[in-house]
Amino acid sequence: MHSRKPFFIFVALLFIFGTAASIYRSVEHNVPFLPGKQVQSWSVEAKVMFNGTNKAAEASLSLPQDDAFDVLSENASSPGYGLNISDGDDRRAVWSIREASGRQSLYYRVTLVPTGQLDVTQDEEPEVPEAFTWQVTEKGAADQIMNDVWQRSANNLSYAQQLMSVINDSNQSQNLALLLSVNNRTQLFLQMLQSKGVPAKKVSGLMLEDQRRRQQLSPYVQVFHDGEWVLFDVEGNKEGRPDNLVLWQQNNQSVLDVIGGSNSQVNFSMLQETRSALATSIDMMNNSDAMDFSLYQLPLEEQSTFKGILLIPIGVLVVVFLRVIIGIKTSGTFMPVLIALAFIQTTLLTGLIGFLLIVAFGLMIRSYLSQLNLLLISRISAVIIVVIFIIGLFTLISYKVGLSEGLTITFFPMIILAWTIERMSILWEEEGPKAVVMAGGGSLFVATLAYLAMSNSWIQYWVFNFLGIHLVILALVLVMGQYTGYRLTELKRFKPLAGDK
């Protein structure tokens, strides 16, 4: 006797791999498990303006590169200008033109999708910054403040926290008032951090608020502590990063550089949008150019076809369960699956009525054909032609009486219907009408349950967007294929024995 251990290992691998593939698709590609989920995105437009000087001009704008936001799409509007978007650690859009005169306006638009990754981490310890060189008139006051705060702190983070509190204290000391008279709060905060050798850098961020216009980037300071860059909003006296803040520039580079122009500035407008989470994930996958095992790469026509094909395993699973475990008899092994597919096109009630009418008329005509003693092939062929005539007749009648639902009866698989009529006719002759009713009723019952499963919007969504589910279905089918016990409907055999006890 062969060991079943390899079989169960294989089934377990199918189940684990299918489940893991589905979870990977959800986590890595942000494909939502629930259909209809919406996500918020932000459309941000940067408007660059400067005065041309009647000569060649070049404008370079820093572009967002923030792990907390994915770039869904980006484009620029700049008639007459050449445009180049450079990648790398410092992404920039560079517009260029041979001659610029008068007021120039350049536009850059980007759609950002929040990722929820607000923490900025770094494995390597950054280099200790060079101590800031204070002016002679400021050095004494700065040293006194820094030394006092340093004594009250335990590490870089607590030093930064204490320092920000002192800078924003309403009861300013004379030393602090002196320093703030020549420095803004953010600049003074950064200088005092660097003077004590605390890794810190200035970043520029844009606070996203719906329907805001002509916004400017705000300065923030990041302080490195225990592998993470902690954000400080010194002007707002706040620590930590809000989820609607996009860090536009993080590399100590300028946000906007203009050569051949004057009076340059950039401001931002933004708009919050609601998008389908699934459509957003698909767009993100297309942008990443990743070799993803996805049906989304197919043309839409093929995708539509596969949406129907991938429902068949669900119907097969229902049939296997009802036949192997429950013990329901059907006319034809997987005929209920095909009938269920037709029900999806016709709707359940119309499909049931159409199926019963076709089979009933087919059986009557088949009884006449049996009297002619035809060969099997000829008889089946005649039944197929008759089924086509019946479907055509019912369709025409439905059209004449104005029943548009009846027109969908053409979706029934004609060959399968012909074979069903042939089998039921033989069953009628051999075992009587009761057996035909049992087999036909069982087929319709199984087809109805398969239809309910296959027409469920959640199941339709899962089988198309999470292909790993089909491996799980395969594992379940294989496991049920090993079942050799009694069906549930067969347990009634033991009822008399239970009564004897």
Image (cartoon, rainbow, N blue to C red):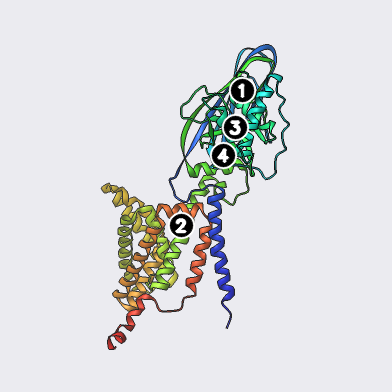
C-alpha gap between disc 3 and disc 4 = 27 Å
Label 2: how many Cα within 10 Å (few below 14, some 14–19, many 20+): many
Q: Which residue is mark 3?
A: 163
**Residue at 67%, 36% in the rendered image:** 198
What number of labels is visible? 4
The residue closer to the viewer here, 351 or 151, is 151
Q: Amino acid at mark 1?
A: Asn
Label 4: how many Cα within 10 Å (few below 14, some 14–19, many 20+): some
Q: Position of residue 52 (x, y in %)?
A: 65, 13
C-alpha gap between disc 1 and disc 4 = 39 Å
C-alpha gap between disc 4 and disc 2 = 37 Å
Quadrant occupied by the N terminus: bottom right
Q: Position of residue 234 (x, y in %)?
A: 56, 29
Q: Which residue is mark 1?
A: 175
Q: Amino acid at mark 4?
A: Ala
Secondary structure beneath dot 2 equals loop
Query: Between disc 3 and disc 4, whose residue precedes?
Result: 4
Query: Between disc 4 and disc 2, whose residue precedes?
Result: 4
Q: On the picture, is 90 further left or further right than 355?
A: right
C-alpha gap between disc 1 and disc 3 = 14 Å
**Residue at 56%, 47% in the rendered image:** 29
Residue 252 sits in quarter: top right
